[in-house]
Amino acid sequence: MDLVRRKRQKPTRGFLDGHFLIAMPGMKDDRFARAVIYICAHSEEGAMGLIINQAQQMRFPDLLVQLGILDEQEAIRLPSKTRDFLIRNGGPVDRSRGFVLHSDDFTVESSMPVSEEICLTATVDILRAISAGRGPRQALMALGYSGWGAGQLESEIAANGWLTCPADTGLLFDADIDRKYDRILSSIGVDLAHLSQTAGHA
């Protein structure tokens, strides 16, 4: 992905890197209704992020078997924590491609720093490590991503489409998908009943 590649080459960070993007109640695109997106890369050329509160139907062991990382018998023997590792719908772009957001205690050559504590890895090395119990302390996986062209995200924010705030690591990685939208709003003191009149940054 060009944005990811440029990010690795250029250490300067966009002002939304490492931020949550929270869909406002009036979001017209159903794919992003009540979505919380973690922004991985942001620059004048565009932005890329992962929806973190929409679950995929595919189970992690099935994905490992599909990718040839494990056979079916090995997948059955995975510990429950690994077996229950949730796969999320990262967005409508390139849905067959996987991304892992994770704590920086684990990195491979392809890992890209997103913030002081969080990296993004889009290669199977990290899936092998997670399946073997050698992965990062905290991680989430998504298939697909959300992308914006130059100036597009800024325009959507200005049009009251999104609320932004710095990402809380605990809320980013916890597996409570169903309540994540409301909990993140609550964490920044936003009342959902008044959100439609609110724009900009928390």
Image (cartoon, rainbow, N blue to C red):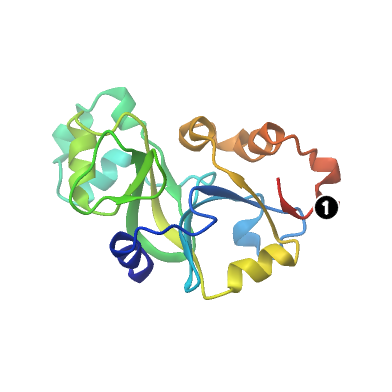
User: Horizontal and vertical percent for residue 71?
Assistant: 13, 41
Residue 59 visible in the snapshot: no
- Tell me the residue at 31%/31% (across/down): 83
| Structural crowding at the residue carrying mark 1, measured as other residues with C-alpha within 10 Å and reported as few (<14), some (14–19) or many (≥20) | few
SS at circle 1: helix
Q: Is residue 64 left or right of residue 55?
A: left
In this rendering, is residue 73 above or below 41?
above
Name the residue type under label 1.
Answer: Ser
Q: Is residue 81 left or right of residue 202?
A: left
- Tell me the residue at 59%/60% (across/down): 31
| Residue placed most toward the observer, 134 or 117 | 117
| Residue placed most toward the observer, 51 or 186 | 186
Residue 22 visible in the snapshot: yes
In this rendering, is residue 135 above or below 29?
above
Tell me where residue 4 sits by quadrant.
Answer: bottom left
- Label 1 sits on residue: 196
In this rendering, is residue 82 above or below 145?
above
User: Horizontal and vertical percent for residue 145?
Assistant: 44, 60
Instruction: Please identify the quadrant where the C terminus is shown.
Output: top right
